[in-house]
Amino acid sequence: MNRQLARMEDSAPTPTRVALSPDGALLAWSLTKATGTTLQVNEMSDPRHQVVVAPVSTAGVRCSSDVPIWSPDSATLAFMASCTSSAAFGGLAARPQQEIFLWDKETGTVRQLTHLTGGLSNLAWSSDGKSLLFLFIENATRDPGYGDPAKPLAGVIDEEGLEISRLYEADATTGRGDFLTPDTMHVYEFGLASNSREIVFLAAPPPGEASWPRAKLYAADKADDSTAVPTLRTRVLVEMQATSGPLHGMQMAIPRLSPDGKRVAFVCGLMSDPVAYGGDLCVANTQERANGIAAGDATVGLQGSVQYEQWLTNDKISLVENRNGHTLLVEWDLSKHQPSKNGTLDLGEVTVSGGGPKGPAGPAIADVSYAPAHEAMAFLMQGHSVAPEIYIVSKGALKQFTHLNDGLQPPTRTISVEWENEGFHVQGWLSFPVDYDPKKTYPLLVEAHGGPEWSIGSRWDGDAWRGISSLWPGLGYFLFLPNPRGSYGQGEAFTLANRRDLGYGDLRDVLKGVDTIEAKYPIDKSREGLLGWSYGGCMTMFGVTQTQRFHAAVAGAGIANYTSFYGETFFTTFTLSLFGGTPYDDPAIYSKLSATSFIKQAKTPTLVVVGERDQGSTPEQSLEFWRGLRTVGTPTQLMVYPGEGHNFNKKDSNDSLRRSAEWFAKFMPASQDSHEKVDSK
């Protein structure tokens, strides 16, 4: 076990951010290794010409540089670095303060622009290049969202000690700046027009953790005055809660303004997490002055899920689409309501230089950067058989830009699996045991993903829980990663199909997928296990109360009782979007979808794991489920990690994996002959 974890920690060098200069001449990108993250700039015409960009640091101080953003004139590169101060903005997370730095292309010099205390994110240049805009949480003690450990409860709840994300503007020469939005708005994302003063942003009343699913889309422009403090004229542009039709109550993400500022595009759909986006493409007109304009769905009936979008012209938008396990790059013509001619590139069906075989296990991409005037884009790409690299699309042709991992072999063989169930087409991934022999039989682990609105794509050594897929095949298991109804990748109707049905239809999809795998591969039906984290933990808890098919289970950070969860968490809107009301409005649906309602049917030995300060799936939920299993006599164990939130640090993550491996080795060992001992030293 320790050897498996050690091999996984020796991960491939991974590019994490890319930024094409608007003139198409340079590519800035960050590279993450075990020693940290560095930033470099390469010439597009000759990638061998490279400059490493870094702030000046003192002896003994390690700098980490990331998030490169080019100025509109391509002369200056802004980036974030965390090496200027040992003062932690994260009192709980104890991470160094990030600041904004500027690299001058002409002189090659780097200077620090900001001197702030708090959390900075979503960096962008103004259209005139005179300032930088970003989201800023002053004196933040943690990142927004539910990943970091929760703050201890103290003071007047939801009134005191709120950490509010606000839009901030800093002068690109002096670094001086101020907030553009009031402390009555928690801003999640914003977008700027390249040729106007228009700004759009998604915001809701604080606390931000509770309000994201009901955020409104605002449009604003700077007031033309000479006051020292900048001001915005703000109006509501789209309010999904007030919109009628199929978009009512949906969520919004990634607002992007057209170059002329007259229209805004965004991803719209049912999204349970503010970190995992998918849905249709919606467009609204920013020129109307009345509040609450309805948005229009520009991709009605799309068979996949839009996960990113960027305007190319005032009439065409580039989309990143997840479709049935493939990643598509689509040029969408708004005037024709369809893709442009020859405007779709399926990354699962192309062969790139340096490897990247084509086929159904198509790779996934992230962090897309555009230079529309030069018909160029850059992005990060990786897949089950494609190690992480940067790729370029120039005038429709795809080529590999970096060669960091040429020759690196996939950690395990993974294929795409597809099946039909109850009128739905469903897809998932199957990883084979290392040294697979078709003449032998093997145990199967089924891992449910988080969300529930989420999906598992083709990623190098990545899965739903702890970002690791090679561990279980390395220990002799088949690993099945299904994308059942409620997932992205099959259209919005598929994503909406598990509303008010969590744990029922999606579990039937998963079980039918297991049937499909059993019919094709040598699976030992007496050694099948279930595991998952977050909503995957919910699925695991609920699954063992609905079927006796699994012989061992590990439930990580799950929810056992949605009624009590509603009263324990700050993420109440998570259930409102999926259940259609509160447990006080509709107690029956909350009871129907809760594992504790069926606890007497649970017979599967289940390990329960959670962080002590998890506010996404509160530890009380794991305690309640564990208590129920103990009461009915089902073998169980509860492990609570002190100080941890929803996302664990590496040490505790590895420990939870070790305990999980020991649990499966005890109740459904990888070896048929004996219980394999897991090294826990």
Image (cartoon, rainbow, N blue to C red):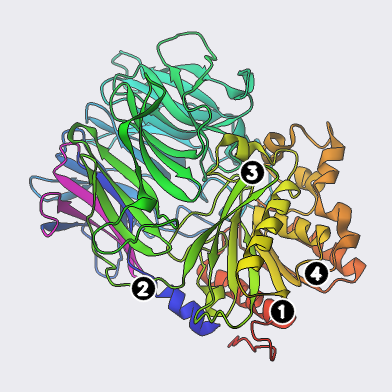
Closer to the chain start, of discs 1 and 4, is: 4
What are the residue bounds of the magenta stretch?
A: 22-48
Q: Which amino acid type is marked by label 1? A: Met
Question: Where residue 550 sits: x, y (%)?
Answer: 75, 68
Q: Is residue 368 above or below residue 364?
A: above
Q: Decide if residue 581 is on the left or right side of residue 147.
A: right
Q: Tell me if 413 is positioned left or right of 453 in this view.
A: left
Tell me if label 3 and label 4 are in contact, CB under 8 Å: no
Side of 145 relative to 254 (left or right): right
- Residue in front for this viewpoint, 130 or 22: 22
Q: Nearer the viewer, residue 86 or 480?
A: 480
Question: Disc 1 to disc 4, how far (Cα)?
Answer: 11 Å
For the point 44% across and 58% down, the residue is 361
> Viewer-proximal residue, 395 or 203?
395
Q: Which mark is residue 604?
A: 4
Q: Position of residue 203 (x, y in %)?
A: 52, 29
- Residue at position x 86%, y 71% from top? 634
- Local packing at callout 3 (Cα closer than 10 Å; few below 14, some 14-19, many 20+) is some
N-terminal of the pair, mark 1 or mark 2, is: 2
Q: Which residue is mark 3?
A: 424
Q: Residue drawn 64% across and 43% down? A: 424
Distance from Cα at disc 3 to Cα at disc 4: 28 Å
**Which residue is disc 1 drawn over?**
668
Alpha carbon separation for disc pair 1 and 3: 31 Å
* First in residue order: circle 2 vs circle 3: 2
Q: Which amino acid type is shown beneath numbered disc 3?
A: Phe
Q: Earlier in the sequence, mark 1 or mark 3?
A: 3
